């Protein structure tokens, strides 16, 4: 168990080297074949073909500087390991002793097989970050344990290489295959994966408003709105209110932007007359909903623009989210992966495909994510327009603050998110940005905070108050 100080280089047989920069600690022998990653994250990694090649435990880490919400540190471990064979690539998943996991990628993205290029090793930089909590509550004290001990899992996965690099983006292929466009009746059959897509004849003779459910990033209608489906009373009230006209719109959220989503939705609507919609949009789905009545998109699709009479934003990043910034992509992947590990979400599959693209240098861009960049031109142009006149618009947001009895990993994740957002948030979206975004404002939002069970970004529809308020706004 070699002990190292800042500046030390530790060789661990066979072929594993740790270089310490502004940090000290203890390295333990690598476990070839890896330490098991348990729970839903481990199952998701196995399904995605990411196997643990080796695991390197490090303990008693001490950085020479402390991270705060506004200042970083250069303290890091440089982990050098054998390069993968020609038909594979690899990435590092850090598992902190507090239960938090984070992704790390090789110093240079691999665009050809590492062995093919003659490289015998790859190096990963692992920041050693420790936090001084701003207040001495139990939730904040959990941060004190962050960064002291961790296991560095080196994961490998198969890759199809071409002469010039990776053959294709696996996340784009995965999304086209597993997140296709579809418009469905959102009844019990849909949530049981037994529904059939609608055709234009479904709309014949319907004159009343239609309730449309639009899901968010990494999601589908049946997973994003599962909390509604689990409440038979809510479904019954919605079906009765809209005479069975409750629809779910499934769409890709990574490689198509919201405007592309709307164009594909409009193509599924009848061409002869405008439809009336009440829209419930979760997360990014609320941005899609804001474009539904756009006259230019409707003209391009040769459809009359639908009339959006009511719009409910649930955790919509109307002002964006820092997780959508290109330089924050790793943070987005980390947050989404931790939410899977903590059983807050089941969106690991698309996240892991993006991890593969980043590891191989195949990621050409994610327009559907970039649309939520708070400093991006797409969102700025959208928010230059005030709220549409005549539409009843509502919003639900949350400030996620887990109680002192919450698991340590959840308290740490909340502390890291608070530092990342520098303000109230639901782990993914800033609270105020749901209802205040440039010229776009939503009056009298429901904000979930205070002495009540904490609601994270993916948990709104499991909350009884949220379901009751939605019913009231819809008149159900």
Image (cartoon, rainbow, N blue to C red):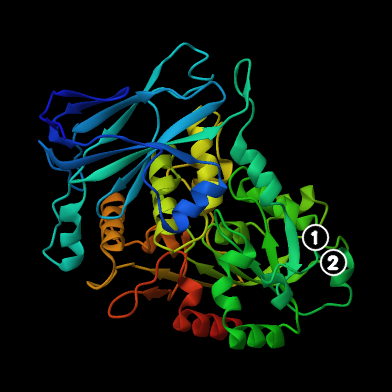
Per the image, the residue denoted by label 1 is 304
Which residue corresponds to the image point at 69% horizontal and 71% vertical from the top-left?
Answer: 192
Quadrant (top left, top right, bottom left, bottom right) of the C terminus: bottom right
In the image, 353 versus 90, the foreground residue is 90
Q: In this picture, is 469 found above or below 402?
A: below
Which residue corresponds to the image point at 21% horizontal and 42% vertical from the top-left?
Answer: 129
Per the image, the residue denoted by label 2 is 273
Horizontal and vertical percent position of residue 204? 89, 73
Horizontal and vertical percent position of residue 51? 48, 40
In this rendering, position of residue 164 left or right of residue 53: right
Which residue corresponds to the image point at 45% horizontal and 73% vertical from the top-left?
Answer: 443
Q: CA distance from mark 1 to mark 2?
A: 6 Å
First-in-chain label (1 vs 2)? 2
In this rendering, position of residue 16 left or right of residue 191: left
Horizontal and vertical percent position of residue 311? 59, 70
Q: In this picture, is 340 found above or below 30?
A: below
Mark 2 residue element: loop
- Quarter of the view holding residue 71: top left
Crowding near the residue tagged with mark 2, few <14, some 14–19, many ≥20 C-alpha atoms within 10 Å: few
In this rendering, position of residue 410 left or right of residue 239: left
- Quarter of the view holding residue 140: bottom left
In this rendering, position of residue 17 left or right of residue 260: left
Mark 1 residue element: loop
Quadrant (top left, top right, bottom left, bottom right) of the N terminus: top left
Q: In this picture, is 295 found above or below 175?
A: below
Residue contact at pointers 1 and 2, CB within 8 angstroms: yes
Farthest top residue in view: 118
Which residue corresponds to the image point at 30% horizontal and 34% vertical from the top-left?
Answer: 30
Asked whether residue 319 appears in the rendered view, the answer is no
In the image, 277 versus 458, the foreground residue is 458
Horizontal and vertical percent position of residue 178? 67, 50
């Amino acid at each position: 168990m070699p002990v190292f100080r800042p500046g030390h280089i530790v060789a661990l047989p066979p072929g594993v080297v740790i270089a310490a920069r502004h940090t000290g600690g203890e390295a333990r022998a690598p476990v070839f074949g890896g330490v098991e990653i348990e729970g839903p994250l481990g199952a998701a990694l196995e399904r995605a073909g990411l196997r643990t090649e080796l695991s390197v435990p490090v303990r008693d880490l001490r950085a020479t500087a402390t991270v705060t919400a506004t200042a970083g540190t250069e303290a890091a471990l440089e982990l050098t390991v054998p390069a993968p064979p020609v038909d594979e690539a690899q990435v590092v998943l850090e598992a902190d002793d507090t239960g938090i996991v984070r992704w790390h990628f090789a110093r240079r993205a691999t665009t050809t097989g590492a062995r093919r290029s003659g490289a015998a090793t790859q190096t990963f930089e692992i920041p050693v970050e420790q936090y001084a909590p701003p207040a001495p509550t139990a939730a904040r004290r959990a941060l004190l344990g962050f960064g002291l001990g961790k296991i560095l899992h080196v994961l490998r996965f198969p890759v199809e290489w071409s002469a010039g690099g990776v053959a294709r983006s696996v996340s784009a292929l995965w999304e086209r295959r597993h997140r296709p466009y579809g418009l469905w009746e959102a009844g019990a059959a849909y949530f049981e994966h037994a529904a059939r897509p609608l055709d234009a004849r479904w709309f014949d003779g319907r004159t009343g408003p239609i309730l449309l459910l639009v899901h968010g990033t990494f999601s589908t209608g049946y997973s994003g709105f599962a909390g509604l489906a689990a409440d038979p009373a809510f479904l019954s009230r919605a079906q009765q209110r809209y005479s069975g006209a409750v629809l779910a719109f499934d769409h890709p959220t990574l490689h198509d932007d919201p405007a592309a989503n709307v164009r594909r939705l409009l193509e599924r609507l009848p061409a002869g007359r405008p439809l009336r919609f009440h829209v419930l949009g979760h997360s990014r789905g609320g941005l899609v909903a804001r474009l539904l009545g756009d006259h230019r998109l409707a003209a391009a699709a040769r459809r009359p623009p639908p009339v959006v009479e009511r719009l409910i934003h649930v955790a919509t990043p109307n002002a964006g989210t820092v997780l959508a910034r290109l330089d924050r992509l790793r943070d987005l992947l980390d947050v989404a992966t931790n939410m899977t590990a903590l059983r807050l979400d089941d969106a690991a599959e698309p996240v892991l495909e993006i991890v593969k693209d980043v590891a191989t240098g195949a990621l050409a861009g994610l327009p559907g994510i970039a649309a939520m960049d708070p400093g991006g031109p797409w969102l700025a142009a959208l928010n230059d327009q005030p709220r549409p006149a005549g539409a009843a618009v509502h919003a639900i947001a949350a400030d996620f603050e887990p109680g002192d009895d919450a698991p340590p990993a959840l308290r740490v994740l909340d502390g890291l998110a608070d530092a990342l957002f520098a303000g109230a948030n639901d782990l993914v979206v800033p609270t105020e940005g749901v209802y205040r975004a440039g010229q776009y404002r939503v009056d009298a939002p429901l904000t979930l905070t205070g002495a009540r069970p904490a609601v994270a970004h993916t948990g709104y529809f499991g909350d009884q108050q949220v379901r009751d308020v939605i019913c009231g706004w819809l008149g159900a």
